[in-house]
Structure formats: C-alpha cells, structure tokens
Image: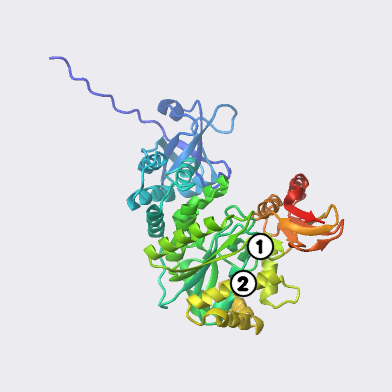
Amino acid sequence: MPERLVPPDPIALAPVRARRLGIDTHHEPVVVLRADSPTCRAEGFEAHTRVEVRGAHGSIIATLNVLSSGTLLEADEAGLSESAWHRLNAEPGMPLEVRYAPPSEGMSRVRAKIFGSRLGQDDFAGILGEAIEGRLSNVEIAAFLVSCANGRIDRDETVRLTKAMTAAGTRLQWPQPKVVDKHCIGGLPGNRTTPIVVAIAASLGLTMPKTSSRAITSPAGTADTVATFTRVDLDLDAMRRVVDREGGCMVWGGAMNLSPADDVLIRVERMLDIDSSGQLVASVLSKKLAAGSTHVLIDIPLGHTAKVRSRADAQALLDLLSHTAQATGIELKGMISDGSQPVGRGVGPALEAHDVLAVLRNDPAAPADLRQRALQVASGVIELGGLAKGEAALLLAQAALDDGRAWRKFEAICQAQGGLRDPGVATYRQPVPAAREGSVHAIDNRLLSRAARLAGAPQAPSAGLYLDVHVGTRVARGQTLFELHAESPGELAYALDFVRHHPGIITLED
C-alpha cells in the first residue's frame, strides 16, 4: 500500500514591525511592504492585494502597496498609512501579521448587481456591513455605486437600500409625535436656508433636530457652513441635550453613527463626482429615519445647470422620494423650486455663513433672495408641523424672523452647541470684472461651483467666491461680477486660471 502523503505544516513567518509613515490615504487603510521582505515573497503578494493585518489590539483589512526600491523600510517592517495606524491602535515596532484577506461576500453581491441582478435587503445589508467594517476598498465601493447609477436600481431596491442603510447605524427616537426636518437636493450654489429654517421652526415650538452632511460635490455642505460659526461634531448625548433645551440643533450626522454606511459611500461619491437618484434618495431618507424625523420637506431646485435639469426629472425624483418615504413611515412634502441661478451672494462655507447671519439679524444688506427662499421652506415645514397652512404659514415664518425670535433662538442653539463665533474671511481675494457692458443673462451653477472649489472650498473654510450680480443685473465694463476668495495664493491662481478659460460662467447680453 502506497505511503499516505501528509501536507506540510504552513511556514510560520516572523511578524513584521509596525512603522508609521504619516501618509494620509483618505480613510482607506494602506500597508506598505518591501518587495524583498520575507512576508511579501512567501505569500506572493502583489501591489493592490487586499490583506488582513493583525496586531495586539485588533485587525484591519488594508490595501497593500509594494516598495520596490529605496530605503524607506527595513525588510522586517510594515509601513502603515494614518488610517491603518489609527484603526489598529498601533505603536512603533508593534508586531504585525500580514496575510491574504478572506474573500468578500459583499463583492459577490456587487458583481451580481453589475450583471443585472436585483438585490434584496439582506444583499444591501451585507455590502454595507463590509463597507463600514473596512472590508471593501474604495475601488470596490465605487463599483457598487456605479452598479446602482443611471437607473440601475429600481423603486423597490431603493426602499431596501434605504432600510439597510438605516439599520446599519443608530436610530434616534423623540417623545414628540411630530419631528420636522428639511432637505435640499442641492446643485445650487449658496442656498444655505437650513440654519434660518431651523431657527424659525424652533422659535415657534416645533422640534427640528437637524443633522446635515459635509459637501459631496458642492463648495459647501450645510455642516461645513455651520462649522464656521459653531460646533457641529456633537455626540448623541450632547445632541439630545441641545434639542431638549432649545427644540432644534444643527449638527454633523457623521459624528454620531446615525448613518455610517452613507458616510462611507459619500467619501467615494465625492471622488467619483456622481450622485445617482436611487443612492440620493436612500442617503437622504436613511438619515431622516436615523435622526427620528417623522415629517420631512424636500426642496428640488430645477434649472439648466442645477443638479436636476428638467421638470420630468424633478417629478420622477419626487415620486421616488414619496414612494420610499411612504414605505418607510415618513410623511413627505415636496417642492420644486427655481434653480436657474445661485441663491445669496456667498459660495463657500464661511461666505455662506455670513449670508445666513445677515438674514437672521435682519441686516438691510442681507441677500433678499436667500431670505425669501428660507421663508418659503420654513412655511412648508410649519405646514408639516401643523401650526398653519398656506399664506398663514408664510406670515407666521415671516413674523418669527422680523421680530427677532428666530435670531434669539439661533443664538441659543449655537450657545448650547458650543458657542457662536465669527465665520472669518479669506486672506487672498481677487475680483473678476465684466469684459464688456451688458445685462446678466445667465449664471452657470456648475461652473461657478467649480471655481469656488478650485479656490479651496470646502476644505479651506473661508475660500470660495462672493457673487456681486444676479440674472438681470446691468453691469458696466470692468465692474466686478464676482470676487474669488482663497486661503493661499496658489489656490487663488488655480481658480483664476479656470475662470479665464471659462468665460461662460456668467453670460452677458446687450
């Protein structure tokens, strides 16, 4: 009888030593090994292999980079990015084991979606769970987002994705039977109505625990703007104290684990510069459900250079929002608004904050369009809250703003969140003049937003631009159309170069 072959025991490799590289890889853990290291050679690792890294305080899934030359690392060292270092709670020289990562079940579901399969709620939950745990790379998350873009996710899948995103994090509950909220689909520079609406609603006795996002593709998200004048990174207990005391808040949802899956997806969406309808609806409503909102107003700006460009697309999006809201227990009110041009004057976190403060203080120089827009949204929220309807709701909102109640409530909310401070201004500014005389015929929202982002917004809080004109404004040759604001001369030059190559940002006609 032939001798039975016994497979050899796996070779036990010596662990590698942790070394902090100080490289910011934007939330994605990265580990670096030398190509000639025993671990790399024995395992047959190649660049971009997904690996599991185990240390004394836990383990992570990371993307491998391979050092093929140079002396950055010793052969027995593993270099860690900042994200990997902090997730492992690593220490210099700490022993680490690096091995192949287990196969991803989530990616099997993503591949099925890419090839046309419809996903169930458990499928979405599995994908999101691995994304939150860091088991999916940015490339794999991008594959999921693209597989759901351009109408590839249907109405029922949108409901399932919304429920899965809500279940993945903490869900708040409030004793009040009605908890109001609002959301703008975006795509319109400026238009920072949220702090004004929260102040009006809370001053009238409504409960409005507003959680907001950082910017995805815009020069400022609501959380970016609010962070310039008060603290937004409150935890759940602090948020509850503010709402119990003042009836409302303006906080960043990412600090409270309310929708951790959405936070992960948004980071990749920002790099891809995409925001599909199904993902957008799931993102918006999962956050509302997580925040405990029962009645939500959705504002959809409509315009040729806004995010939503046709009446049919706006109605289709509103129908999808309404369907998903009904399936998840939210009462939703939609409004399709004018998105033909920016609202207010500031574009960028601090610049938009100055507009907000001017409206709340009833400053005579405050942008009238932002004030009117905020009153329209506030009246819709008041209707949802059951205080008044129609013209009476608008008059109620206007009275709260005019007599100072909204400003006093706004101050109280800011103080409860950590204090009210001045948003600040940029060091470097450059006016952009009109090349000829004429009337402003059109303003390209997307190009204007791009210019503000190239100037540094939203990462540089005081960066962006200040808009001096709106559609219909008559200008002379050499008159300022807008002023670029930056925190460094390099970013200012970068934005100016873009503006010079895109004369259609503001169109003049005789």
Residue 249 visible, this orientation: yes
- Residue with the mark numbered 1: 190
Query: Disc 1 marks which amino acid?
Result: Gly
The answer to the question of whether label 2 and label 1 lie on touching residues, with beta carbons closer than 8 A, is no
**Farthest residue, direction top:** 1
**Residue situated in front as seen by the camera: 357 or 237:** 357
Mark carried by residue 374: 2
Tag 2, which secondary structure?
Answer: helix
Residue 353 at x, y = what percent?
67, 67
The quadrant in which residue 357 appears is bottom right
**Residue situated in front as seen by the camera: 500 or 136:** 500
Q: Residue at x 35, y 28 (%)?
A: 11
Query: Disc 2 marks which amino acid?
Result: Ala
**Farthest residue, direction right:** 477
Q: For mark 1, does the 10 Å Cα neighbourhood hold few (<14), some (14 to 19), or many (20 or more) residues? A: many
Tag 1, which secondary structure?
Answer: loop
Earlier in the chain: of badge 2 and badge 1, it is: 1
Mark carried by residue 160: none
Task: Using the image, determine if residue 307 lies above or below residue 206.
Answer: above
With 374 as the anchor, is 115 left or right in this view? left
The quadrant in which residue 257 appears is bottom left
Residue 347 at x, y = what percent?
69, 60
With 270 as the anchor, is 429 left or right in this view? right
Figure quadrant of the C terminus: bottom right
With 416 as the anchor, is 6 left or right in this view? left
With 416 as the anchor, is 52 left or right in this view? left
